Image (spheres, helix red, strand yellow):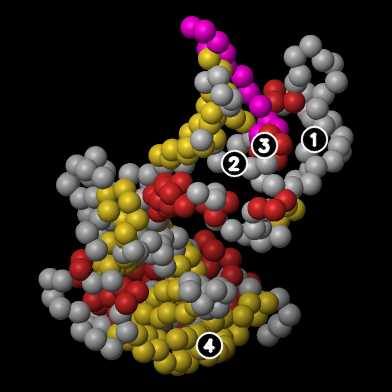
Amino acid sequence: MNTLLCKGMFCLLSWEADSRGRHGEYTLQPLSLQAEETTELGSKKELKSMPFITYLSGLLTAQMLSDDQLISGVEIRCEEKGRCPSTCHLCRRPGKEQLSPTPVLLEINRVVPLYTLIQDNGTKEAFKSALMSSYWCSGKGDVIDDWCRCDLSAFDASGLPNCSPLPQPVLRLSPTVEPSSTVVSLEWVDVQPAIGTKVSDYILQHKKVDEYTDTDLYTGEFLSFADDLLSGLGTSCVAAGRSHGEVPEVSIYSVIFKCLEPDGLYKFTLYAVDTRGRHSELSTVTLRTACPLVDDNKAEEIADKIYNLYNGYTSGKEQQMAYNTLMEVSASMLFRVQHHYNSHYEKFGDFVWRSEDELGPRKAHLILRRLERVSSHCSSLLRSAYIQSRVETVPYLFCRSEEVRPAGMVWYSILKDTKITCEEKMVSMARNTYGESKGR
């Protein structure tokens, strides 16, 4: 009589060896080549190990896997091929110096669930239930249709069932949209499993991080992917998208930010929310946007203009004109003006010294301190001999939900079931090209 009792991923197989009542028990652990046999000898119990291949050979000998009742998808072929490593305790034979041969990996003709290898229907269902519970419900509940019914012991401190884990989404830059000075696209794969927890929403937080901002006090802006982005009720500077991975069943959600500040350090954080209100672990991406656009021809013209205003006697009107011109341009443009001025007119005095001499220390300080806003990365790029601005367009799939989710019912809605309409649009991406190939 063969009996298979399962709990979680562990199964206990018992059988009656002969008519005299002697019996043994094997504990089988998945993905393990070790089985433990307990043989009762009087009042003593002897514990020993055997290779899994030996166990299968025993089954063949006992005609449990006879030729007339082969199990579909499994073919067993063994041959000697080298020796077991000395570190493998399963290969040692007590009293023999010869090591047992290394079994060849079984050839897999077809992938089938483990429980289909069992012939007895009752045992098969018990094994299937145990495997499904272990895989989808952490072994702390039962699979009912496409959800987990948790055991009474599988509740967290808040009283919410937690036998079905809520995976952590992984936020990343979209590989199809290269970040620009103002536009960044992020994406993540939908983490809702086929069975178990149901994702209701994704919460995205973004904030600018710099030396002037207290990151503990400034929390940035929180956006609900379902209520703010897919509904279209949020800001026009942020839009939602959706696509599919290599497998159609895999959904990829994306968000595009179109109004970021150039040369800014931003921190983006994402977490999932399930239909019971649980939050997943956070996923974070920190990046700096590209350097601001620079009109290099205009910067060179301004440098020439400032030189002409500084040259010779500078009247009060000319001083004010030079001051206004330098204060009106952006910090990156001012950096480029300084670069061109020093490249062409440094022999008459560098830009800093001439500004202090012509405008006075106070006005010169107001102008020059703006250069501190340019990061070290952009400062090195803005010293390039050649800069050209270009604008390119890239396609992006903008998505909107077709239905309005009722207020106060967010936790009870499943994001994957939301009907979404997507439309491909072109997004303008402005960039600088830097080089050393062009002179004046």
Residue identified by numbered label 3: 62
Q: Between residue 142 and residue 155, name the one nearer to us.
A: 142
How crowded is the residue under tag 4: few (<14 C-alpha within 10 Å), some, or many (20+)?
Answer: few
Residue identified by numbered label 2: 31
Q: Between residue 280 and residue 219, name the one nearer to us.
A: 280
> Which residues make up the magenta segment?
41-56
Residue type at mark 3 is: Ala
CA distance separating discs 1 and 4: 56 Å
Residue drawn at point x = 45 percent, y = 67 percent: 189
Residue type at mark 2 is: Leu
- The reply to whether the magenta stretch includes residue 48 is yes
Task: Name, please, the residue furthest toward the top.
Answer: 43
With respect to residue 9, does 226 lie above or below?
Answer: below
Residue 394 shows which numbered tag? 4
Q: Nearer the viewer, mark 1 or mark 3?
A: 3
CA distance separating discs 2 and 1: 17 Å
> Is the C-beta separation of discs 1 and 3 under 8 Å?
no
CA distance separating discs 4 and 2: 47 Å
Judged left or right of residue 75, residue 324 is left
Q: Position of residue 146 (x, y in %)?
A: 35, 64
Q: Say which label, 4 or 2, has the lower sequence index.
A: 2
How crowded is the residue under tag 3: few (<14 C-alpha within 10 Å), some, or many (20+)?
Answer: few
Residue type at mark 1 is: Thr
